[in-house]
Image (cartoon, rainbow, N blue to C red):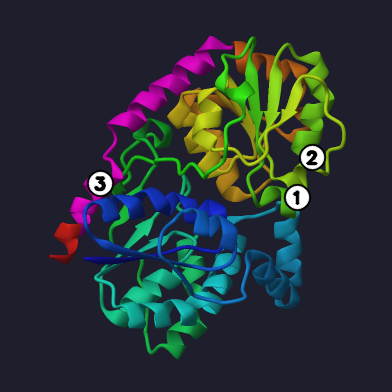
């Protein structure tokens, strides 16, 4: 079986597909990843990759979007992202990336297409070549899929497709205790993809006191800045804990001198980092959220207004596995509670056990085999 997996050109969209692609390879199937931009990090996944839009990066997409949708883009850059805005945003991106995706599918002739929920151009490619498509959700929110499809009307016309209907199988990686119920998708355990990187010796030793990881993902520092990390640096001397900044070097350099109880960790494998930590502070992204749940550690989310991150934060707080607050409410007392509240840790470890019992990517690959047989 040949499986073509599509994602938007962003690490947080691409990496969640990697464990599934590797499971398919391990079962003897051919896989191809269709994306663009972020060349170094995409190549690190060590999977066959088709560049569906040479020269296009996430930054260039935002730049081009800004020219035609200035007001919408400014609201997005300010962190005010409703589901409607998400539909305009990612639907427009999908329209721009559709031709390359369709051409890739026509050349490679897959038996099945898997597309992450922000990349409905994958659904169009599957429709054009006449194969089943499976949507891979990324977090707790389903996103504004109808809006995305509406803003792909030009791409559908170019490829002679009357209508796209998102009614096929989909992969739900959210544990039922987080969502409150089974939602009708194929459950699949979210396996964090741990990008490469050497663990420093100090991280391999047992910490002498609580160790808190701080990460903002790859998009937030570029779009909204490093305000959360700056706030942590200001509070760190007041907290009986050590901190490690998991930030790219270009983001770390924006912070200046560090307090004595803060280390710059650089781009670290997230799973290994969180396994050594007591807790994590982050921006509310799904990848970091699931990595924290997989490690069974409490998390503090400081979401930036993006709708999916707000949904993630609300769900984690409701489950009792973490906390959330606005940046201006983040203080030393919040950080102290993060590492001392045993109820948070207990709930996080309960969800960790729940994740371990969810179907693995290898089991989902068997369902793919049945789907195309």
Using the image, determine if residue 90 lies above or below residue 361.
below
> What residue span does the magenta drawing correspond to?
341-368
Distance between the alpha carbons at the discs numbered 3 and 1: 37 Å
Query: Quarter of the image containing the N terminus?
Result: bottom left
The reply to whether residue 38 is in sight is yes
Q: Secondary structure at mark 3?
A: helix
Disc number placed over residue 357 in the picture, else none: none
- For the residues bearing labels 1 and 2, Cβ distance under 8 angstroms: yes
Who is closer to the viewer here, 55 or 152?
Answer: 55
Query: Compared to 335, does 97 lie above or below?
Result: below
Residue nearest the viewer, comparing 339 with 168: 339
Percent coordinates x, y for residue 54 in the rendering? 57, 77
The residue indicated by pointer 3 is 362
Examine the rendered structure and indicate whether residue 201 appears above or below residue 4. Answer: above
Query: Which residue, given by chain and number where applicable, does mark 2 sit on?
Result: 227
First reached walking from the N terminus: tag 3 or tag 1: 1
Residue 41 drawn at (x, y percent): 56, 55
Q: Is residue 281 above or below residue 121?
A: above
């Amino acid at each position: 079986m040949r499986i073509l997996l599509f994602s938007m050109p962003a690490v947080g969209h691409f990496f969640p597909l990697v464990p599934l692609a590797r499971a398919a390879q391990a079962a003897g199937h051919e896989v191809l990843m269709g994306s663009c931009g972020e060349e170094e990090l995409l190549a690190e996944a060590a999977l066959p990759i088709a560049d569906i839009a040479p020269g296009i990066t996430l930054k260039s997409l935002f730049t081009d979007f800004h020219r035609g949708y200035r007001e919408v883009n400014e609201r997005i850059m300010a962190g005010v992202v409703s589901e409607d805005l998400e539909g305009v945003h990612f639907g427009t991106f999908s329209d721009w990336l559709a031709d390359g995706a369709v051409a890739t599918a026509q050349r490679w002739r897959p038996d099945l297409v898997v597309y992450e929920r922000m990349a409905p151009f994958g659904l169009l490619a599957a429709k054009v070549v006449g194969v089943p498509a499976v949507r891979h959700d990324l977090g707790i929110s389903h996103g504004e899929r109808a809006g995305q499809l509406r803003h792909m009307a030009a791409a559908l016309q170019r490829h002679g497709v009357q209508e796209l209907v998102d009614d096929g199988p989909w992969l739900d990686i959210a544990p039922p205790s987080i969502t409150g119920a089974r939602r009708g998708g194929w459950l699949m355990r979210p396996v964090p993809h741990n990008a490469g990187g050497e663990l420093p010796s100090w991280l391999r030793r047992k910490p002498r006191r609580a160790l808190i990881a701080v990460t903002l993902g790859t998009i937030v520092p570029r779009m909204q800045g490093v305000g959360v990390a700056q706030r942590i640096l200001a509070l760190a001397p007041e907290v009986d804990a050590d901190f490690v900044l998991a930030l790219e070097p270009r983001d770390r350099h924006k912070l200046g001198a560090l307090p004595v109880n803060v280390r710059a960790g650089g781009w670290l494998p997230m799973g290994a980092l969180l396994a050594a930590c007591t807790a994590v502070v982050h921006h509310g992204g799904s990848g970091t959220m699931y990595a924290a749940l997989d490690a069974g550690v409490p998390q503090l989310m400081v979401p930036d207004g993006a709708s999916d991150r707000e949904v993630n934060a609300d769900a984690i707080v409701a489950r009792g596995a973490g906390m959330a607050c606005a940046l201006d409410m983040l203080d030393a007392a919040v950080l102290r509670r993060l590492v001392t509240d045993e109820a948070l840790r207990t709930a996080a470890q309960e969800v960790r056990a729940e994740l371990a019992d969810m179907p693995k990517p290898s089991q989902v690959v068997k369902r793919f085999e049945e789907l195309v047989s």
